[in-house]
């Protein structure tokens, strides 16, 4: 088994906080998800999470107009300059204070950053200049008297509109102007949310939090703003821009130059003589509107404007509010186009795509992201994660789907290929404790704290069975047998295991014997229906459900409380995680212990803000709460209340690799130590709650365990609630506080040859392929094990030679070739070619592969999954073409019928003409 697993995608979380963006091509939405960034490709229907991770949650993001660079700033003010091409971090810069917004200029030469009441303008690195410093400061604008909330550039990148919490907007220039200084636009009675320039104009729209919209008209267009550099020779222009060191200091400080522009109407030229008097640019308010008048607000409900975006090409303005509504207006006439409600909670982000057809809206509290096409009034994308933490997950038998259950009572199905949720079940009224698929993959089952086990049909997406106990219980564990007929659920309050028939829905049996919560259940993969249950009573029990009474029960004592249990895929072993941090392995038939792993120190818990003991002491109380065997059963995946996921080799009882799922310090229990500067005689200062904004503040309720905790501030704690290996063996997933993290194998990162010899080189492999010795070339390619070279050799084999090559390969290379072509089917365009390889391998070596089916189960599942996916894709195209051909054929028939009728009518006309001629001839003869 290979362990080159790398983070590949984040599923289950689509948006947390910050602003939303579209890429310059307009096809992809960029959304911050905690300390990562996700890209949602709307054209190809696929999501991707960048392999870029920050130490804190991202709050401000912007993309350069070129689409190659982007800047992301986290909560502490650390900025990451990244490349969208290489998906890597180019430079890090710390602003030392929180940054409210960041904005690139339309020409891409500058970007502005708002920190406190100042705006810092930097030169974009790599834009037509070679700077040693990636963040070269161009100018500092100290124009506001309170924190800056928004920045907007004009179309020519010479003017900036800066809005702040002091209820005013300042319009200023990047460089000195002859007829323009700083103009303050103050007509609002609340903090500014956003401000915008009209397209190719200096007119400004300003919006405040209480829903006021002001329209400001400039006395001239952008061409009327005269720079001090206009009319100068290039050499004198460079000298003026360079200036003396004292002038540079004035520019950076943003004080002396601003005063000059404010007070001087007569600008001296370079020779010291007074030039012409330039007419000053002025602004006047031409409109004031109240957006709340268009909202349907219930009595007593307080609604604030939280986000806005303006598209200059279509003159469309979208505004989002704290009650989940958004408005679409046409400016500057203020014509209401649409008024809709997309969420039950506040909409915290809004953005237009470059063409103005799509609107991206995000709700941070609900974790919801939607893309709305306002012209057709339809959703292009609508995704929402779990509101609370995820509690459980499970892979489908083919690995194509993933089911998750959360504390919000929802069960969601996710496509592992594109990362999107395609169905949500909301029948549960309490948290979901466990989920699982049936063996055939046609149904899923979920156990909840509401006392029900529900079965969902994956064909019609409906709840077709609801299983309940005779009395009210809370279910904590769930298992289904290989046939999919017997369902078992363990309760956490009555300490019993309930057994139902899924086909009839009847309760078959109640297994009693445990003296505490039944924490885990697992069925053996065989047809014997052997069930293992774990409990907090320091025992695990082996049940034979179809044995005679008195002979189907066996209790195994443990050294500590059992937290979970898991069967090996071949059914010859099961593992139990105990409270003392150990993983104990047993043989199910003799109930004898075969191995034990002490993993307490490997879990390495961090120190929480509320802890009064050190992290080293906390490690003594750590334990694994979730287990999962690999597809071949040689290794086991374990995790718990920690930021680490461990992979152990069962037979050797060794830790093979440990994965750190996050480094996000916005979560609790990430650090091993707490800074002594935060520790006071009253406790940890990190627990003191800062004053929140009015739309985020909530009532303080004493004694509440979830949600707001009085005057204390609590961060979500990092933990891994569930782990699961993909049946294909090429990926595994972990349900964490941040979402479902998917780690997959990447063959391009590791050189892993097989029986490599000195003569096996790329040159000799290509030479064998040119000599048409395809068997030797394929075997040598798998021995070198380079993906690109293997693809080249396999695709170079003619279709007529495939059968001969397959028959001539030894068994060990047959399995490697089947694994290779099965994996290639997921992305290749040569579908028929690779399917021919699969069919030929299965026909020629079917008996040998069947004997080793348990060992190559991951390979067979990969082939099944990818063949099914390609069949589903092609069947849609074929169905569409089939009906299109029927339509064309029907049109041809109608056309032939019309042509035949026309010919008949022409023949009739000719006959009539002939009869007329004959009659006229007879009349002439008679006469």
Image (spheres, rainbow, N blue to C red):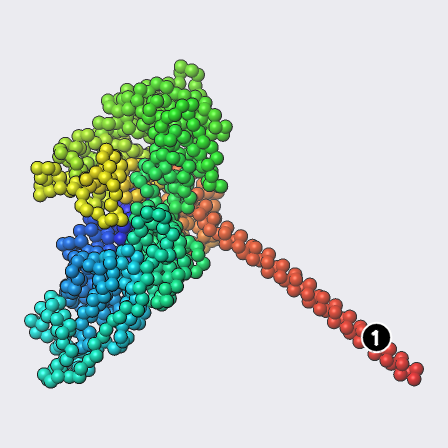
Picture residue at 31% right of the left edge, 19% below the top:
515
Q: Position of residue 913 (x, y in %)?
A: 80, 76
Label tally? 1
Q: Position of residue 612 (x, y in %)?
A: 13, 34
Picture residue at 25% right of the left edge, 34% below the top:
705
Q: Nearer the viewer, residue 778 or 186?
A: 186
Q: Position of residue 451 (x, y in %)?
A: 39, 29
Which quadrant of the rendered structure holds the C terminus? Answer: bottom right
Q: In the displayed structure, does residue 496 sit left or right of residue 79? A: right
Q: Position of residue 408 (x, y in %)?
A: 34, 38
Which quadrant of the rendered structure holds the N terminus? Answer: top left
Residue 777 in the image: above or below residue 571: below
Q: Quadrant of residue 898?
A: bottom right
Residue 467 in the image: above or below residue 290: above
Q: In the displayed structure, does residue 456 sit left or right of residue 895? A: left
Q: Nearer the viewer, residue 546 or 817?
A: 546
Residue 827 in the image: above or below residue 466: below
User: How busy is the neighbourhood of tag 1: few (under 14 within 10 Å), some, or many (20 plus)?
Assistant: few
Secondary element under disc 1, as helix, strand or loop, is helix
Q: Which residue is mark 1?
A: 915
Picture residue at 44% right of the left edge, 29% below the top:
467
Q: In the displayed structure, does residue 206 sit left or right of residue 132? A: right
Picture residue at 9% right of the left edge, 83% below the top:
272
In the displayed orientation, state which residue is furthest to the top: 550
Residue 340 in the image: above or below residue 243: above
Can residue 36 be seen from the camera position used here? yes
In the displayed orientation, state which residue is furthest to the front: 299
């Amino acid at each position: 088994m290979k362990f080159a697993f790398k983070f590949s995608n984040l599923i289950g979380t689509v948006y947390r906080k910050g602003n939303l963006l579209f890429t310059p091509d307009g096809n992809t939405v960029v959304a911050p998800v905690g300390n990562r960034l996700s890209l949602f490709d709307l054209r190809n229907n696929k999501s991707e999470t960048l392999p870029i991770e920050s130490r804190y949650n991202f709050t401000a993001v912007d993309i350069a107009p070129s689409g190659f660079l982007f800047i992301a700033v986290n909560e502490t003010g650390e900025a990451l300059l990244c490349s969208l091409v290489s998906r890597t971090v180019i430079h890090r810069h710390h602003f030392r204070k929180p940054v409210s917004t960041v904005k690139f200029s339309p020409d891409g030469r500058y970007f502005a950053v708002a920190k406190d009441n100042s705006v810092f303008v930097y030169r974009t690195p790599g834009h037509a200049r070679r700077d040693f410093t990636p963040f070269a400061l161009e100018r500092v604008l100290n124009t506001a008297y309170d924190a800056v909330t928004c920045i907007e550039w004009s179309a020519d990148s010479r003017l900036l509109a800066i809005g702040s919490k002091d209820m005013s907007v300042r319009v200023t220039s990047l460089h000195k102007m002859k007829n323009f200084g700083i103009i303050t636009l103050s007509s609002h009675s609340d903090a500014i949310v956003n401000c915008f320039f009209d397209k190719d104009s200096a007119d400004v729209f300003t919006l405040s939090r209480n829903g006021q919209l002001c329209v400001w008209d400039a006395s001239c267009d952008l061409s009327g703003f005269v720079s001090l550099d206009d009319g100068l020779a290039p050499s004198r222009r460079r000298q003026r821009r360079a200036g003396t060191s004292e002038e540079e200091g004035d520019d950076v400080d943003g004080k002396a130059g601003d005063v000059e522009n404010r007070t001087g109407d007569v600008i001296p030229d370079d020779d010291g003589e007074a030039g012409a008097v330039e007419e000053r640019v002025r602004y006047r308010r031409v409109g004031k509107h109240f957006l709340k008048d268009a909202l349907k607000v219930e009595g007593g409900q307080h609604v604030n404007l939280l986000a806005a975006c303006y598209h200059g090409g279509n003159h469309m303005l979208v505004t989002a509010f704290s009650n989940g509504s958004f408005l679409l207006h046409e400016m500057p006439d203020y014509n209401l186009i649409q008024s809709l409600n997309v969420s039950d909670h506040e909409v915290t982000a809004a953005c237009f795509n470059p063409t103005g057809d799509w609107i991206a809206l995000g709700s941070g509290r609900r974790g919801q992201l939607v893309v709305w096409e306002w012209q057709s009034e339809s959703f292009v994308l609508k995704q929402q994660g779990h509101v609370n933490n995820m509690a459980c997950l499970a892979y489908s038998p083919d690995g194509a789907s993933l089911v998750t259950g959360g504390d919000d009572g929802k069960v969601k199905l996710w496509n592992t290929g594109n990362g999107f949720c395609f169905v949500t079940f909301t029948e549960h009224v309490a948290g979901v404790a466990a989920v699982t698929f049936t063996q055939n993959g046609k149904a899923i089952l979920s156990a909840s704290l509401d006392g029900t086990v529900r079965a969902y049909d994956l064909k019609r997406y409906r709840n077709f069975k609801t299983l309940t106990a005779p009395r009210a219980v809370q279910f904590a564990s769930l298992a289904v047998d290989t046939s999919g007929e017997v369902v078992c659920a363990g309760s956490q309050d009555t300490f019993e295991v309930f057994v139902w028939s899924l086909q009839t829905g009847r309760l078959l049996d109640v297994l009693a014997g445990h003296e505490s919560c039944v924490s885990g259940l697992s069925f053996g993969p065989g047809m014997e229906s052997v069930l293992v249950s774990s409990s907090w009573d320091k025992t695990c029990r082996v049940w034979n459900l179809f044995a005679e009474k008195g002979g189907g029960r066996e209790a195994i004592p443990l050294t500590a409380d059992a937290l979970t249990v898991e069967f090996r895929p071949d059914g010859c072993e099961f593992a139990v995680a105990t409270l003392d941090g150990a993983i104990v392995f047993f043989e199910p038939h003799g109930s004898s212990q075969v191995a034990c792993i002490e993993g307490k120190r490997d879990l390495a818990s961090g120190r929480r803000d509320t802890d009064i003991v050190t992290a080293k002491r906390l490690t003594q109380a750590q334990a694994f709460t979730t287990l999962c065997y690999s597809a071949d059963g040689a290794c086991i995946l374990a995790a718990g209340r920690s930021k680490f996921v461990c992979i152990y080799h069962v037979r050797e009882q060794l830790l093979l690799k440990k994965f750190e799922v996050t480094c996000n310090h916005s979560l609790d229990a990430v650090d091993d130590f707490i800074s002594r500067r935060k520790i006071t005689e009253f406790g940890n200062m990190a627990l003191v709650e800062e004053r929140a904004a009015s739309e985020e503040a909530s009532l303080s309720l004493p004694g509440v365990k979830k949600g707001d905790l009085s005057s204390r501030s609590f961060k979500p704690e990092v933990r891994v609630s569930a782990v699961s290996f993909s049946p294909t063996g090429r990926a595994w997933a972990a349900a964490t506080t941040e979402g479902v993290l998917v780690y997959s194998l990447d063959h391009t990162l590791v050189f892993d040859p097989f029986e490599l010899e000195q003569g096996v080189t790329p040159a000799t492999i290509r030479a064998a392929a040119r000599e048409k010795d395809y068997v030797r070339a394929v075997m040598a390619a798998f021995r070198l094990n380079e993906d690109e070279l293997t693809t080249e050799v396999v695709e170079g084999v003619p279709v007529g030679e495939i059968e001969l090559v397959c028959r001539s390969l030894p068994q060990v290379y047959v399995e490697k070739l089947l694994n290779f072509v099965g994996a290639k089917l997921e992305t290749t365009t040569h579908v028929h070619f690779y399917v021919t390889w699969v069919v030929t391998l299965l026909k020629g070596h079917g008996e040998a592969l069947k004997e080793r089916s348990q060992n190559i189960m991951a390979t067979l599942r990969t082939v099944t999954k990818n063949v099914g996916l390609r069949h589903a894709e092609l069947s849609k195209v074929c169905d569409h073409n089939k009906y299109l051909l029927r339509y064309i054929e029907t049109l041809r028939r109608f056309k032939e019928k019309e042509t035949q009728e026309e010919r008949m009518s022409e023949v009739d006309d000719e006959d009539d003409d002939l009869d007329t001629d004959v009659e006229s001839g007879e009349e002439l003869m008679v006469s």
